[in-house]
Amino acid sequence: MKLKVLGCSGGIGGNLRTTSFLLDQDVLIDAGTGANELSLTELSMIDHVFVTHSHLDHIASIPFMVDSAGFMRDHPLTVYATEKTLDILRQHIFNWKIWPDFTQIPNAGQPFMRYQAMELGETVVLNGRKITATPANHVVPAVGYHLDSGKASLVFSGDTTTHDALWEVINKIDNLRYLIIETAFSNDEKELAILSKHLCPSMLAEELKKFHGNAEVFITHLKPGEVELTMQEIESMIHEHCPLMLLNNQEFEF
């Protein structure tokens, strides 16, 4: 399995792109503005999108992707998420007011897009690749994802604040090689991090004390304008796991 970072920022501007990861050539993990980096042909090859939660920075490209590449496909794009997240997409995005309902276009029998509900802990197997929904604690219903090739694994936390259930799952993964975890705000913004259910460096430090593995740790979802400060705070507070900043176009093979 190969995971490419299309976008990993908590905002936009310049070369900043919001969360989206390309798994091999046919799967997206979230579809924020980072997915806009794909060509039309590459977009037409995406068969599956796994959504962590309904916030715009994680779903912004789905409406445009379906509209732009749907006619090039002979089967629907499948959007996976919890039922609560899918309900939000139905009610607030693909509702004919914000965007057309592509589960009905060009017709209900042969739509450009379909929904597939996932429960927490459920695993979807795609050509031997296992994708499992992991716990997250955010202001809207949310999950992360555990990607397992059989040889090694990667966990993406999605947007989350402190959450013991996540570490209970992570610590049971024997072949974990990479952990991508969010830290949206600097320590000066801790109250905002708590209110919005994100992490700041001091909170991340406490969370990583719960991690019993030795996987490489990468930081995602850094807010624009606070990137350097937040990473400096992480580096000064966390020494055991030596977290690194996730970068656009970074690739992980596992």
Image (cartoon, helix red, strand yellow):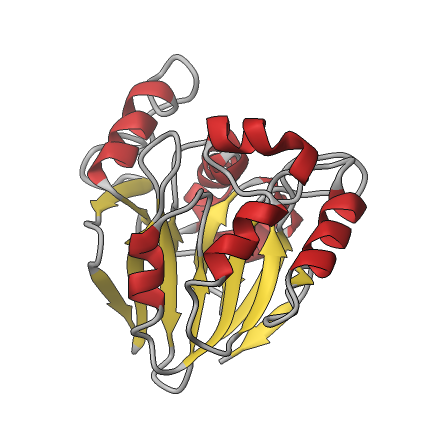
The outermost residue toward the bottom is: 151
Residue 231 lies, in percent from the top left, at: 73, 52
Q: Is residue 6 above or below residue 162?
A: below
Instruction: Tell me the residue at 38%/68% (across/down).
Output: 147
Observer-nearest residue: 73 or 196?
Answer: 196
Q: Nearer the viewer, residue 68 or 48?
A: 48
Quarter location, residue 81: top left
3, above or below 100, in the image:
below
Left or right: 187 in relation to 70: right
Q: Residue at x 39, y 12 (%)?
A: 97
Q: Position of residue 85 (x, y in %)?
A: 29, 35
Q: Position of residue 168 (x, y in %)?
A: 29, 63
Q: Is residue 81 above or below residue 232?
A: above
Q: Is residue 248 visible?
A: no
- Viewer-nearest residue: 174 or 247: 174
**Snapshot quadrant of residue 167:** bottom left
Q: Is residue 231 left or right of residue 86?
A: right
